[in-house]
């Protein structure tokens, strides 16, 4: 490899171009003072002192024991460790960005007329959407799918805990749900009231889709259960307002045309 290729390799491990240039010079020359580093690399002498110090911190160079301040290169295998550490940092940053991107999106769409959509896959992605509802703290307009039992029953009762936290956060849920004996029990024994769950029943076969629809704040969440486990959040004041109106119309329709329950 020529010098430029060696410098490029060192940069890919995580060194800056200046650090890589000085390190390659140390390997080639054996031992250099900061003044000599400056002459060879074209960097200022002051900058070379800082570069040498950083190379020592990275275990790529060491200060010699001579009276004159000089440095010599250490084994390049430390570059591999540097590259591995850099990869781990990138992976942690990727996870952090993924966990917090919704806050940035919320800020963007709150100050923009452009709607947007964000899709997250898997059960953990679905949980992120539910946690976003808790964070937003706006009332929720819900068209429920019976398939959410997958999350509630098979995933350590996540939905049970979510519903309790939702009520604790003062969020009222205006729900349109398929009729079932279990749901009617919740509607009559005080469970719905405790969970701030304002329920309207529809026939069990009126909606058999595997996608739950949640409208909250300026967002619409489409949560898919069953074979496909994913969620899409649409951020748009116009779309969320339209979906909220549709949900209210359906609730009004079934409240008048389908037998509801009387609270005990």
Image (cartoon, helix red, strand yellow):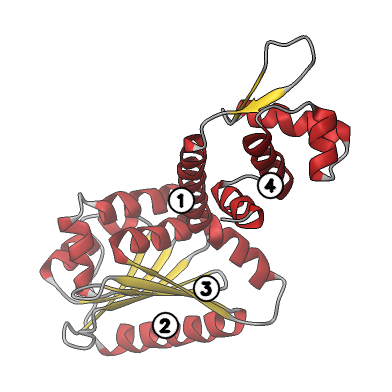
Residue 91 numbered mark, or none: 1
Quarter of the image holding residue 140?
Answer: bottom left
* Number of numbered callouts drawn: 4
Q: Residue furthest left?
A: 181
Q: Are marks 1 and 4 in contact (CB under 8 Å)?
A: no
Viewer-nearest of discs 4 and 3: 4
Mark 2 or 4 closer to N-term?
4
Q: Is residue 34 above or below residue 166?
A: above
Q: CA distance from mark 1 to mark 2?
A: 41 Å
Viewer-nearest of discs 2 and 3: 3
Mark 2 or 3 closer to N-term?
3
Find disc 2 in the rendering and name its residue. Answer: 247
Q: Secondary structure at mark 2?
A: helix
Q: CA distance from mark 1 to mark 4?
A: 20 Å
Quarter of the image holding residue 177?
Answer: bottom left
Residue 16 numbered mark, or none: 4
Q: Position of residue 85 (x, y in %)?
A: 48, 40
| Quarter containing the N terminus | bottom right
| Quarter containing the C terminus | bottom left
Which residue is rendered at x = 21% and y = 82% of the image? 259
């Amino acid at each position: 490899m020529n010098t430029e290729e060696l410098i490029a390799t060192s940069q890919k491990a995580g060194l800056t171009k200046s650090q890589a240039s000085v390190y390659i010079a140390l390997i080639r020359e054996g031992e250099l003072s900061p003044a000599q580093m400056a002459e060879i690399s074209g960097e200022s002498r002051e900058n070379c002192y800082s570069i040498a110090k950083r190379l020592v911190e990275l275990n790529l160079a060491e200060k010699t024991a001579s009276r004159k301040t000089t440095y010599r290169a250490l084994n390049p295998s430390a570059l591999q460790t540097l590259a591995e550490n850099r990869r781990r940092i990138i992976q942690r940053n990727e996870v952090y960005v993924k966990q917090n991107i919704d806050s940035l999106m919320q800020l963007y769409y709150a100050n923009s007329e452009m709607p947007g959509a964000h899709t997250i896959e898997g059960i953990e992605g679905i949980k992120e959407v539910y946690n976003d509802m808790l964070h937003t703290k706006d009332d929720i307009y819900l068209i429920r799918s019976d398939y959410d039992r997958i999350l509630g029953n098979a995933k350590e009762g996540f939905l049970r805990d979510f519903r309790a936290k939702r009520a604790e956060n003062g969020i009222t849920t205006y729900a349109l749900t398929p009729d079932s004996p279990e749901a009617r029990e919740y509607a009559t024994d005080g469970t719905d009231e405790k969970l701030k769950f304002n329920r309207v029943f529809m026939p069990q076969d009126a909606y058999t889709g595997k996608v739950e629809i949640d409208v909250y704040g300026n967002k619409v969440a489409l949560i898919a259960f069953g074979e496909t486990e994913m969620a899409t959040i649409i951020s748009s004041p116009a779309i969320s307002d339209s979906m909220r109106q549709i949900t209210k119309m359906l609730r009004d329709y079934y409240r008048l045309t389908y037998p509801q329950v009387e609270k005990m």
